[in-house]
Image: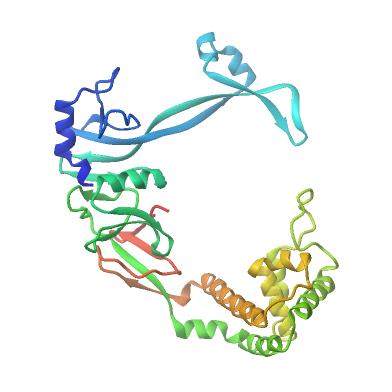
């Protein structure tokens, strides 16, 4: 956070006038950018700077009686809206809201030249602004846990609420540990052993099957076990739709007796390639010869992933070196500070 150094902000308070009507609100950069500023306050008898980007909005709802009890000047700040229920507007009934705005404080700069991330959410606008104040970039990386900071020369950090870094070097004041999750192959193989025969049998059957035959068979299996219930949601009536858990329960029941049927139910349960919707629209489409093999691999990967997620014992943690870029990981990472897990910004 090179652009938010304590000495620079302190110099601004001495050389730049605060915004009109305030004694402690100063611009960080160009004065016209009046949504980006800092507030001066005292903490432990020292001056600290709250960095503000934009505005937080909140609201309070009033009952009719509370609204009527307000004085006229306060009533002017309350907005009145028609009340709604499931059928539409309710005649002669209203809801009353007052909206409040507060500064969106994203962090605090202290006299030891550190910046502490204090915002609850770090959306794209905040990341862009903070990147401009720093010597690197903040961006979202889902396979590395969420929001991360990186520089050209290799410095790399996960970013979490409460993290405090030196404004010049971006070195955290409190060390953290990144734990990357990996699948223990031996445990994973044992976990999936009961489904190995099902996938072997299905793979052979699909190589000799056309797409239309596969789809028609899937419809027959659904009709046989669910008696014509809908595969997808009806906008006017949510009842009657087959739930994913029902597909999963049936798939597990059929695994050893009807492997192809079980595979089809897993396909619907995970909705691979939006299958529940696609098979209702056009089961006679002409597909390439490789379509079913591709579907088989997609279902198998998704099945394995879901099984792993439900079995924590299949994972092992591997610590990474603080400050270095760690490998992307689809199974997730954990950030620990003083032995306790912290929540990385997402």
Q: Is residue 105 above or below residue 207?
A: above
Where in the figure is residue 6, as x and y percent of width and height? 17, 39
Q: In terms of depth relative to the viewer, which is nearer, 311 or 274?
A: 274
Q: Is residue 209 left or right of residue 120?
A: right
Query: Furthest-top residue in view?
Result: 72
The count of marks equals 0
Q: In terms of depth relative to the viewer, which is nearer, 272 or 322?
A: 272
Which corner quadrant of the image does residue 244 belong to? bottom right
State whether residue 335 appears in this view. yes
Look at 20% across and 55% down and name the residue there: 171
Where in the figure is residue 102, as x and y percent of width and height? 40, 29
Q: Is residue 54 above or below residue 338?
A: above
Which corner quadrant of the image does residue 213 belong to? bottom right
Q: Is residue 116 left or right of residue 238?
A: left
Q: Is residue 52 left or right of residue 267?
A: left
Where in the figure is residue 132, as x and y percent of width and height? 28, 45
Where in the figure is residue 262, as x and y percent of width and height? 71, 79
Q: Is residue 123 above or below residue 274?
A: above
Look at 64% across and 85% down and name the residue there: 199
Q: How is the rendered protein coloured?
A: rainbow
Look at 47% across and 75% down and name the residue there: 313
Q: Is residue 94 above or below residue 195?
A: above
State whether residue 45 appears in this view. no
Q: In terms of depth relative to the viewer, which is nearer, 104 or 29?
A: 29
Look at 25% across and 34% down and name the residue there: 29
């Amino acid at each position: 956070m090179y652009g938010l150094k304590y000495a620079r902000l302190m110099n601004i308070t001495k050389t730049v006038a605060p915004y009109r009507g305030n004694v402690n609100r100063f611009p960080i950069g160009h004065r016209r950018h009046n949504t980006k500023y800092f507030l001066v306050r005292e903490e432990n008898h020292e001056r600290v700077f709250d960095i503000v980007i934009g505005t937080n909005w909140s609201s309070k709802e009033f009952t009719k009686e509370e609204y009527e009890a307000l004085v006229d000047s306060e009533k002017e700040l309350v907005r009145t809206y028609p009340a709604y229920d499931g059928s539409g507007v309710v005649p002669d009934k209203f809801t009353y809201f007052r909206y409040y705005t507060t500064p969106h404080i994203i962090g605090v700069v202290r006299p030891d030249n550190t910046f502490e991330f204090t915002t609850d959410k770090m959306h794209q606008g905040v990341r862009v602004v903070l990147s401009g104040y720093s010597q690197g970039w903040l961006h979202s990386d889902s396979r590395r846990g969420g929001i991360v900071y990186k520089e050209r020369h290799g410095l790399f950090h996960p970013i979490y609420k409460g993290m405090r870094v030196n404004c010049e070097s971006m070195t955290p004041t409190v060390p953290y540990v990144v734990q990357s999750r990996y699948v223990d192959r031996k445990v994973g193989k044992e976990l999936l052993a009961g489904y190995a025969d099902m996938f072997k049998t299905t793979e052979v059957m699909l190589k000799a099957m056309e797409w239309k035959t596969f789809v028609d068979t899937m419809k027959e299996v659904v009709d046989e076990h669910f008696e014509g219930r809908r595969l997808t949601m009806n906008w006017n009536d949510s009842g009657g739709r087959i739930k994913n858990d029902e597909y999963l329960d049936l798939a597990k029941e059929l695994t050893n007796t009807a492997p192809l049927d079980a595979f089809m139910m897993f396909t619907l349960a995970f909705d691979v390639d939006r299958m529940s919707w696609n098979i209702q629209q056009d089961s006679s489409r002409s597909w390439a010869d490789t379509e079913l093999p591709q579907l088989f691999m997609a279902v198998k990967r998704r099945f394995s992933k879901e099984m792993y997620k439900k079995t924590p014992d299949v994972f092992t943690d591997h610590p990474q070196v603080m400050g270095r870029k760690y490998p992307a990981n689809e199974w997730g990472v954990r950030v620990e500070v003083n032995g306790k897990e912290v929540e990385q910004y997402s």
